[in-house]
Image (spheres, rainbow, N blue to C red):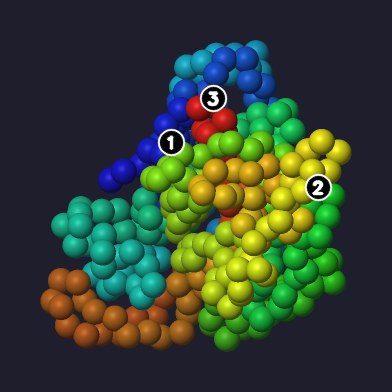
Amino acid sequence: MKNTFGNNIAVTLFGESHGKAIGAVLDGMPAGIPVDEEFIAYQMSLRKSVGAISTARKEADEVKIVSGVFNGMTTGTPVTFIIENQDTKSRDYGELAYKARPGHADYTAEIKYKGFQDFRGGGHFSGRITAGLVAVGAVVISALKSEGITIGTHILSCGGVNDRTFNNIPADIDSLNNKEFAVLDDEKADEMKSAILSAKNDGDSVGGILETAVNGMPAGYGEPWFDTVEGLLAHALFSIPAVKGVEFGAGFRYANMRGSQANDSFRNINNSICTSTNNCGGILGGITDGMPIIFRCAVKPTPSIYKEQQTINLKTNEDTDLQIKGRHDPAIVHRARVVADSVTAIVLYDLLRNK
C-alpha cells in the first residue's frame, strides 16, 4: 500500500475502520507553527455523523497528538495524530467476509491482498480513515490562513437539489466555515436533507457535488508537466474514497465553448494583474495565476445500501445475493466537505513550502 502523500510536507495515514485506532503522521512541518486543538476539534466535528442523515455509528473522534508539538507549537519533528475507534460493531460484517459488497473495494482488495485484508467496515479502505486527514488538515488550514489563504467547500448539489455557486468568494468562504451543513443558500439545506431522508427510507442512498474555492493563493506555484496544481489536487482529491470526478474552473463546459468565450482576459486593476473571468479556475499551464482556485468533486452515493443486491461469493466464485446490515450513511457528501478542505490545504501548503 502507498499511504504517504506529499513532497515538502508528507502525510502518512494508518489504521482500519474497526481496528483499535486510526490516525496520521505529518512530517516536514516547520517548527513554530501554532497548533490549535480547539480548532482541530471543530474541524473533526464537521466530519462527524449528525442526526438521521448520517450513520448511527457515533465516534467521539478525540484527537490525541503524541509527538511533534510542545507548548502549542510544532517542534519540527513528525506530528502524530491518534484517533481511537470506540463505537465498532464488527459482528455486522461477519457475512461479508466472503461476499463482495457492490461499489466497495472488497473484490479488488481480495485480489490484491490475497484475503489477508481487514474486511470489517472496509478496513483501511473505509471513509473512516479520512478522519486522520481532517486532523492534519486543521493544522495546515490554520497555517495557510496566517498567510492570507482561505479555503471553503459547499454542497453544490445533492439528491437533485442545487445550491447557488460562489459569487463573493471571501465572504462565502467565511460563511461556509461556520456551518455544519455547508450550503450557500440556507433554504436549500432542508431540501437536501429531505432528499437524503427520502433515499434512506427507501433503503437507498444519494450522491452529490462539492464545489471548493481557495482565496489568496499567490501566482507562480506549480510544476509542469507532472506536478501541475490540477494534477496534485486531483491526486489528493481522488484519494477521498467516494470521489469519482474532479473538474477545474469551467471544466467540462469548456467543450461547448468557443475560444473567445473560454479565454480569461487579463486586466491591471489597482496595479494587480487579474483576469476579468475565471474559467480556468485560477490555474494556467498547471501554475496558479493569483485568481481564486475553483474546482468541483463528484461524490458517489454511499455504496452500503439496505436493498438486496447481486454479488459473488469470493471463496466459491458463485453468484449470490447480499443484503447489507449494520449502520451506514444514506449520503456522505455533507461529511466529505471538510475532507475536501483538508486535502486541498495539504496540497497547497506543500506547494508553498517549495519556495
Residue 37 percent across, percent down from the top left: 67, 30
Query: What is the C-alpha distance between the residues marked 2 and 3?
Result: 25 Å
Which one is closest to the eye, mark 2 or mark 3?
3
Marker disc for residue 329:
none
Q: Earlier in the sequence, mark 2 or mark 3?
A: 2
Marker disc for residue 6:
1
Amino acid at pointer 1:
Gly
Query: What is the C-alpha distance between the residues marked 3 and 1?
Result: 15 Å
Amino acid at pointer 3:
Lys
Q: Residue at x 82, y 36 (%)?
A: 271
Kindly indicate whether the residue at mark 3 contacts the one at mark 2 (C-beta within 8 angstroms): no
Marker disc for residue 355:
3
Q: Residue at x 58, y 78 (%)?
A: 256
To which residue does mark 2 refer?
A: 170
| Helix, strand or loop for disc 3 | loop
Q: Quadrant of the N terminus?
A: top left
Kindly indicate whether the residue at mark 1 contacts the one at mark 2 (C-beta within 8 angstroms): no
Amino acid at pointer 2:
Pro
